[in-house]
Amino acid sequence: MKWIGAIILLCATTWGGFEFARRLTERPKQIRQLKNAMQVLEAEILYGQSPVTVACEKVSQQIPAPMSWFFKEFSDALKQPSASLYDVWEEKLNHYWAMSSLGEGEKEIMRQFGQTLGQHDFAGQQKHIRLALSHLERELEESQEQQQRYSNMVKSLGFLTGLLIILLFI
């Protein structure tokens, strides 16, 4: 019976390590998707001269999940008459972030961008989008470095932690 418990514990800690490594791998991918979404949003607002609701709906159709979910939910919520743009942005951002592999840095960039969304003319909006893109680029470089540095270590650490716990209990 001890051995079955030991194997289950080892499998659980190894799975935990692999799950954390997966999140490290997903983060750069999702940042690139977020950057792509911001570029599409810029094109829709500046060149298509679409309102924010329509622009976000078009963004959700052009980017892959999970990023498309955020923009689709945001666009749908803006169609409600009592919703202010920033409140809806903040609510959907908080709801979505729990489902993503993105970090707090990206969340703060998007929160600050949400404060300026729809507040300026086309040139001002473009400057804010470009600023958000440059911040996301910095976060992308950092996340790629973290992935390279820690991904294999986290996988091994999960297995070794399970092994240590088993050895302590036996």
Image (tube, rainbow, N blue to C red):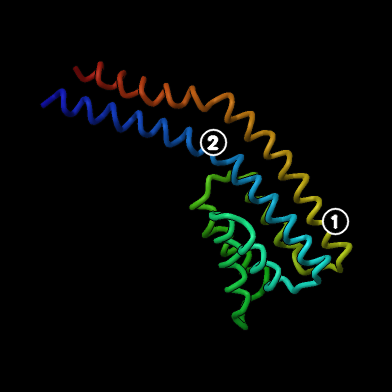
| Image quarter of residue 80 | bottom right
Which sits in the foreground, 3 or 86? 3
Q: Residues within 10 Å of mark 1 (few under 14, many from 20)?
A: few
Q: Secondary structure at mark 1?
A: helix
| Residue at the right extreme, as displayed | 123
The quadrant in which the C terminus is found is top left
Provide residue 138's location: percent of width, then percent of height: 73, 38
Instruction: Name the residue carrying label 2.
Output: 25
The quadrant in which the N terminus is found is top left
Q: Secondary structure at mark 2?
A: helix
> Which residue does the image show at 23% across and 31% down from the upper left?
8
Disc marking residue 29: none
> Which residue does the image show at 67% across and 71% down from the upper left?
85
Relative vertical location of residue 126 with respect to residue 103 in this rendering, above or below: below
Provide residue 41's location: percent of width, then percent of height: 73, 61
Instruction: Name the residue carrying label 1.
Output: 127
> Which residue does the image show at 64% across and 29% down from the upper left?
145
N-term-proximal mark, 1 vs 2: 2
Which sits in the foreground, 63 or 18? 63
Q: Residues within 10 Å of mark 2 (few under 14, many from 20)?
A: some
Q: Name the residue type under label 2.
A: Thr
